[in-house]
Amino acid sequence: MSSRDDPDQTYREFTEAVNMKPGELSTWLDTDESKHVGWRRKGSGGGGGETVGHESGRKIIDLLRRKRGQLTEADYKHMRKVVGYVRRHMAQRPSGDVRDTRWRYSLMNWGHDPVKAPLPPPGGPSRKALDRHGTPPKSRRGPAR
């Protein structure tokens, strides 16, 4: 079984990538900023319809509210998609203050608020461990990303 198929690893990476609580994400998805960022599928009526990220945000709320034993293979597949999206977009962080940027708003639709906390590196210590022990000194962080 590859690590990509490991439900425990997928679940851990998902809960590290998604740093918004279900109620917080639900409130965010109701905002105009949330509804106006992101990519719309072809055939959505020339700009109408829900964005892919907004739809994902609604799925994420459902995933966060379910017990782990209720998750299906399709749920784990979506979790892997969320982790990939968050990691790719965090790697493209723009310089300067990101509080009021479409980049941040798009990530928030996927359940990650980059202003809250940094995302742990893949396979690295969990967010809880970073909270307990702090970020390691640069000399112990490995190669620059």
Image (tube, rainbow, N blue to C red):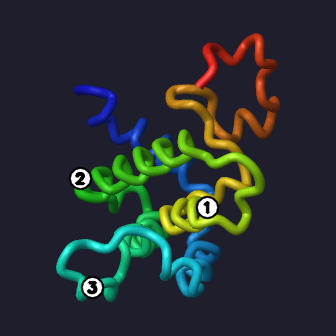
Look at label 1 and name its amino acid.
Answer: Arg
Secondary structure category for the residue under label 1: helix
Cα separation between marks 1 and 3: 24 Å
Measured Cα–Cα span from mark 2 to mark 1: 29 Å
Residue in front for this viewpoint, 100 or 87: 100
Question: Label 2 vs label 3: CA separation?
Answer: 33 Å
Q: Residue furthest left?
A: 43
Look at the image and tell me whether residue 66 can be seen.
no
Reading the image, the residue beneath label 3 is: 46
Residue position marked by numbered label 2 in the rendering = 73
Q: In the picture provided, is 60 more to the left or to the right than 24?
A: left
Q: Is residue 49 left or right of residue 38?
A: left
Under mark 2, the amino acid is: Glu
Disc ID at residue 104: 1
Between circles 2 and 1, the one closer to the viewer is: 1
Query: Does 143 appear above or below 100?
Result: above
